[in-house]
Image (cartoon, rainbow, N blue to C red):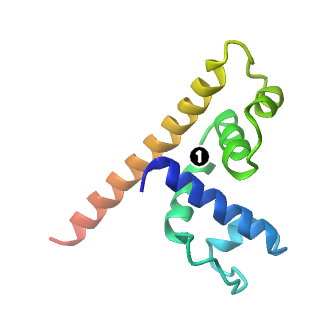
Amino acid sequence: MTLDERLDNWAKAQRYADGCGGGRAASVYFAGGGGAVISSDIDLADARRVELAWRKLMPFAKALLKLHYMERQPSMVICRKLGIRARPPGAYDQALCQAKREIGGMLESEARAGMLANSDHTD
């Protein structure tokens, strides 16, 4: 799965959880989720990994990814809310690219750490 697909999957899981009226979206990923039925096209395991990485991001990157993926806000609205300059037009794209790079790096390092932990147990 590409990073964009992973972020879309994460956002879909978040939107689904928010629409269920069950309170916090995190209840979908963690124990005690209330037994809610989840759409079959959502990869919950990956959405959980993305959620955990997202929680570690700096506030600006978190807000940008949330507004873009979960809330599907237009770029002009996101620029206004986060104080990103609307001109030049590439400023928003650059900020989004940086936020995606941050979460992508975090997901990669966690995947590498998981592989190292798994290889330690196979000896």
Q: Could you say which quadrant of the image residue 73 lies in? A: top right
Task: Identify residue type, mark 1.
Answer: Lys
Q: Residue at image x 52%, y 43%?
A: 103
Q: Is residue 36 visible?
A: yes
Q: Residue placed at 52% from the left, 69% from the top?
A: 43
Residue 48: image x %, image y %?
A: 56, 64
- Could you tell me which secondary element the residue under label 1 belongs to? loop
Regarding residue 51, the answer to whether it shows in the image is: no
Q: Residue 22 in the image: x percent, y percent?
A: 81, 75
- Within 10 Å of disc 1 (Cα), the crowding (few <14, some 14-19, many 20+) is few
Question: Which one is in front, 116 or 91?
Answer: 91
Residue at 60 percent across and 49 percent down: it is 54
Report the quarter where the C terminus lies. bottom left
Q: Is residue 37 above or below residue 87?
A: below
| Residue 67 location (% of width, % of height) | 74, 43
Which residue matches tag 1?
A: 56
Q: Which of the 4 quarters of the picture holds residue 41?
A: bottom right
Q: Is residue 48 left or right of residue 59?
A: left
Q: Quadrant of the N terminus?
A: bottom left
